[in-house]
Amino acid sequence: MPYPQKHWILLQKIVDRIRNSLELRVVLQTAVDEIATLLNLDRCCFLWYFEDTQRVQVVVERSRHNRKNAQLGYYPLEKFGAIAGAIATGKLIINSKTAVSNPGVVGIVSRWLSQLRLIQPQIKKDQRSPQLPIFQGAIANLLVPLKQSEGSIGFIACISEQPRIWSSSEIEFLQAIAQQLEIAIRQAQLYEQTQKQAQREQLVNQITSLTRQSFDIETILTEATRELMQALSADRCLIHLVESHEQESIRVSEWENHLQNSQPSSAAFRRKHLYEVCREPFPPTIDDFDTHGPITQWVIQHRQQVSISDITRDGRVGEANLEYQKAQIKSSLVVPVQANGTLHAILYLNQCSEIRYWSKNDQKLAQAVADQLAISIQQANLYAQTQQQAHTSAQQAEQLSQTLLELRLTQSQLIQSEKMSSLGRMVAGVAHEINNPVNFIYGNIPYVENYVHDLIRLVQGYQTEYPNRNAELQKLTEQVELDFLLRDLPKILKSMQVGAERIREIVNSLQHFSRLNQASQKSIDIHEALESTLSILYSYLGDEIEVVRHYGDLPPVECYPKPLNQVFMSILMNAIEAISRWSSKEKIIKLRTELVSDGETGEDFVRIAIADNGPGIAQDIQPKIFDPFFTTKDVGQGRGLGLTVSYQTIVSQHQGNLHCHSQPGQGAEFIIEIPLQQPKPLSPSKGEIGDRELGTGDWEDTTMKLAMEIRKTPLGKN
């Protein structure tokens, strides 16, 4: 450089060009390009030496004739041979294979280099210059260090393939560029750190926003790992939920190959407690993941981050690890996902395409995401626990509601039991009291009839023997209308006999219906029970409603007669009321009985069908007709217990079935099925309660029906 003034002008131009950009790689590339051009170098590179990994990175390079940058990458320090120690300590290095021919220049350079901690290694026979790609064909080399910064040292490497002596002005010039480059690098690094910090904050904010939008653990983890993988340009990203008692509330959904709206360059896969996102062309390896692998166990034990640049050189993994070989993993960054001393998961970032040295920015970003994921997982766990508690509370509330309903029904049944029991005894007593005089009348009518016939014959005999009666007797005969009396008196006796027989039938039906004088469980004739119920309901049937009977050949059926009669009463009364409100001209109730056999168990059942041609039951009401207190009648007309008690009587007490078939406008059919023989007798207490489980108002209705029948029964003259 013969013109120092021009030298400094060029230096200023180079510095200005370097400072035109804040991107570190652009800054370094600009510097090596300018240096290579000004110094007419064959190659010029920028090197970073990292103390923690003992490796040197060739960051950028400028070659003559624009040769490909095959030298970029990482190299072990020992590959630099004799100058490795000088690189590690940040010394200025001159290694020239050409002898210095100008003693004056050598003296000046020597004095100047003594102030710059010059190291000029002596080449021995057993030492050779470094044979790395960047030094291939090099004859003269010059490495100018930059000031050390946080575990790394930068070097401007000048390489000449021709013999060359580095002048003091060239070294001074490079040193000046190095000083300015240090400032530019710090500015670029600060800018890069700001960008990385912004990237971290943006990614963390995305995860936070995702957590606020959804508490679904699968959605949070897959989206977060996908974003992290894209931000770090990794090939695989995997989350392993650590199985602990604190996280048992999290239950993953069914396995899905691809998430909806996934990016075409990556896919999400999952297995229980595992979530993986991978970049094409690398296939998913989640099924081969070892949840108890060496790195996993180490992180669980130490709760620290693990950065592995070369898997084959890590003693915990080793070269022969089949899991890592199958997944093609070359480098791995493993971060514990923990909060408040609790390890929730482990985050794995894997590089498969090449060996990667994870930078501090990479580690900081991964740690920031892991910290936010720990909070998200913790919130998702709390949400899942809350949902589980809410579900449990809802179930308990439903159980309490059902229990309260059962208590209300039981209370109503107990009250009605006591009431009906007293009323039943009263009705039975009334029936008994009526039965005695009716039997007296019914039993004496034949004798009275005989006596009257005899008296009529006697009077007729007197009329024959004494046809001529005196005036007074003739007058008496006309007053009493003897001829009419003789004709009408037998008719009156016949009418009294019919009325007495009807009252006797009513009393017998009432006693048969209540069966207070019989055991709680016995074998009865179903047809007789149906006819007894119809007899009591005779006044309600009238002449408008026709009863069609299709009775099968049934043997005696073992049952609880009194509750069963109450079932017949409730269903028939509902049918009568439905038909009475219907506008159809034909009003028909059909009774059908048959004996059926269960094809699986071979058990015999009695089927009793009671159908009407009334308006039917609406579809939305049918599921509720057996519910307690449900009624479609007006207030005060029904209490909603008749069919409920009927259902309990058939299903619970008789171990049978009661169901309804109905279509609106086509009538309704209730089908009762009870075993021919009861599987096992109920306890006396339960049988007694079952006998007393009458619908509200049943006994009152029975009493009213009895009174109406008695009032309608003719006991006198027609």
Image (cartoon, rainbow, N blue to C red):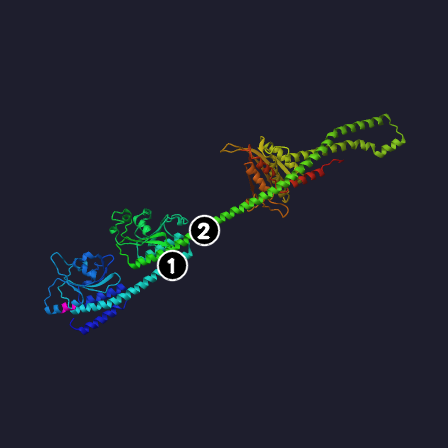
Q: CA distance from mark 1 to mark 2?
A: 25 Å
Q: Is residue 114 visible?
A: yes
In terms of depth relative to the viewer, which is nearer, 578 or 221? 221
Q: Disc 1 or 2, which lies upstream in sequence?
A: 1
Q: Amino acid at mark 2?
A: Gln
Instruction: Tell which tag, 1 or 2, sits nearer the viewer.
Output: 2
Q: Check contact, mark 1 vs mark 2: CB within 8 A.
A: no
Name the side, left or right, on which 149 lies relative to 218: left
> From what the image shows, is residue 546 above or below residue 294?
above
Residue farthest along the top direction in this orientation: 465
- Which sits in the foreground, 517 or 696? 517
Residue pointed to by mark 1: 206
Left or right of 70? Residue 561 is right
Q: Position of residue 570 (x, y in %)?
A: 61, 40
Give residue 64's quadrant in the image: bottom left
Return the residue nearer the eye: 142 or 445: 142
Give yes or no for residue 110 being in the magenta stretch.
Answer: yes
Quarter that holds the C terminus: top right
- In the image, residue 65 sits, relative to residue 697, either above or below, namely below
- Magenta stretch: includes residue 198: no
Quarter of the image where the N terminus is located: bottom left
- Per the image, label 1 sits on a secondary structure element best described as helix
* Secondary structure, magenta segment, majority class: helix
In this rendering, would 521 be left or right of 253? right
**Residue 11 image point, x, y percent:** 21, 70
User: Looking at the image, can residue 261 be seen?
Assistant: no
Where does residue 552 sit, x and y in percent of width and height? 58, 32
Name the amino acid, label 1.
Gln
Residue designated by label 2: 387
The span shown in magenta is: 108-112
Q: Quadrant of residue 558?
A: top right
